[in-house]
Amino acid sequence: MINFVKTYYTIIFAILTIAMIFYQYHFIRKFKSSYKQDGLYAIGTIKKIDDYGRGTGFNFIYTFIVNGKKFTSVCDIGDLSFSTAQKEVDKKCLIIYLNNDVHNNRLYPSIPLNDSLNNDIKIRKWIESNSKVKSKIDPVPSPGYFLQNYF
């Protein structure tokens, strides 16, 4: 077994890398294709900004509560500059997560929420009555890597 791994480690590594890329693509596509039917709303709080790569990109680290359980997740800051994104820390924003997979979620930092919208039904009614907010939901933000949201 060890000789097999030593001989074919580059092939094994390539297969694992391709599998991770495929799963990331599936993770993103699943959200985009089903968030309108299976999406639920929550209030998220941006906790901090983390860099990735060689300081070339940044993610929001945020938390939200579903059924009394606290989740921490990651989402790309998008086209915001780092200094603008820093101003978003401690801000409460819209979270959309899939009903059958709470880890597949997105943060919408351009849609601030207040504490009075404390459940899915209230947020849904508020969105339905506000056309500007509806138009901000359709361009789905980029997630962090799927592994970041699960672990």
Image: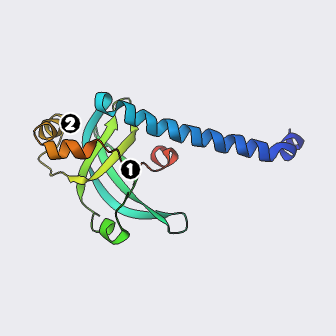
Amino acid type for the residue under numbered disc 2: Asp
Q: Please tell me whether mark 2 or mark 1 is closer to you in this view.
A: 2
Percent position of residue 74, x then y: 41, 52
Amino acid type for the residue under numbered disc 1: Thr
Front position in the image: 66 or 61 = 61
Q: Which residue is mark 1?
A: 72
94 up-or-down from 23: above or below: below
* Circle 2 crowding by C-alpha within 10 Å: few under 14, some 14–19, many from 20: some
Q: At x 50% / y 48%, what residue is drawn?
A: 145
Quadrant in which residue 124 is drawn: top left
Q: Secondary structure at mark 1?
A: strand
Percent position of residue 31, x then y: 39, 36
Q: At x 34% / y 63%, what residue is drawn?
A: 80
- First reached walking from the N terminus: tag 2 or tag 1: 1
Q: Which mark is residue 120?
A: 2
Q: Is residue 101 visible?
A: no
75 up-or-down from 88: above or below: above
Quadrant in which residue 106 is drawn: top left
56 up-or-down from 126: above or below: below
Which quadrant is the N terminus positioned in? top right
Front position in the image: 18 or 51 = 18
* Circle 1 crowding by C-alpha within 10 Å: few under 14, some 14–19, many from 20: some
Percent position of residue 150, x then y: 47, 43
Q: At x 75% / y 42%, what residue is drawn?
A: 12
Classify residue 61 as left or right of residue 136: right
Q: Secondary structure at mark 2?
A: helix
